[in-house]
Image: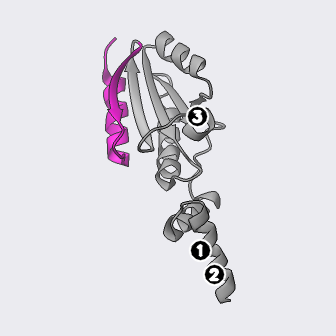
Amino acid sequence: MTKSSDSKSSDSKSKNVKPKEANQLNTIKNNKYDANMENSKVIVVNDNQDYIHLIKTNKKVIMFYSDPSTCYACLKYGSFYKRLANKYHKKALFLYTDIAKCGLSLPITPALYSFINGREFLKLDDGVNHKDIKTMITTILKLKL
């Protein structure tokens, strides 16, 4: 019994994930949170050229940067972002990128950035919560352009 718990600890350490975070990630993987952007109004961006084109050609853009392979908050808030995108998709373009898959580096994930007429407007890049995400999105949606 001790041996199997030691192997679990070493697996967590080898992936730089603390045991508590590993348990949270397992909970998410068991469908507590659905951060998968399929079957939603969120556009998944995996290419820098697509990203630039979408920002420049749409009036209101909200981008969710995530690293779901190691970030519990990315999965938790990604699910919330997806629900808001499904609700408000007619008023803004909602984008999502997995920074690990795209080779991007951000100091903190998740992060949200908004763009108005191709220019950065508001951002949440020092930690997020449900209230801040909703406030940022509703602020963008209320803008008259």
Give the residue drawn at x 60%, y 33%. 102
Task: Identify the element where label 3 is drawn.
Answer: loop
* For residue 56, above or below residue 131: above
Residue 83 x/y as whole percent: 51, 41
Q: Residues within 10 Å of mark 3 (few under 14, many from 20)?
A: few
Instruction: Say if mark 1 contacts mark 2, CB within 8 Å.
Output: yes
Give the residue drawn at x 37%, y 32%. 137
Which residue is label 2 attached to? 5
Which residue is label 3 attached to? 103
**Marks 1 and 3, Cα distance to the nearest angstrom?**
28 Å
Q: Can you tell which quarter of the image residue 111 is in?
A: top left
Which residue is label 1 attached to? 9
Q: Which residues are magenta?
A: 118-145
Amino acid carrying mark 3 in the image: Gly
User: Farthest bottom residue?
Assistant: 1
* For residue 123, above or below residue 80: above
Amino acid carrying mark 2 in the image: Ser
Task: Identify the element where label 1 is drawn.
Answer: helix
Q: Can you tell which quarter of the image residue 99 is in?
A: top right
Q: Can you tell which quarter of the image residue 5 is in?
A: bottom right
Disc sitting over residue 133 in the figure: none
Instruction: Say if mark 1 contacts mark 3, CB within 8 Å.
Output: no
Q: Residues within 10 Å of mark 2 (few under 14, many from 20)?
A: few
Q: Nearer the viewer, residue 92 or 78?
A: 78
**Marks 1 and 2, Cα distance to the nearest angstrom?**
6 Å
Quadrant assignment for the N terminus:
bottom right
* For residue 19, above or below residue 137: below
Task: Specify whether residue 70 is painted magenta.
Answer: no
Amino acid carrying mark 1 in the image: Ser
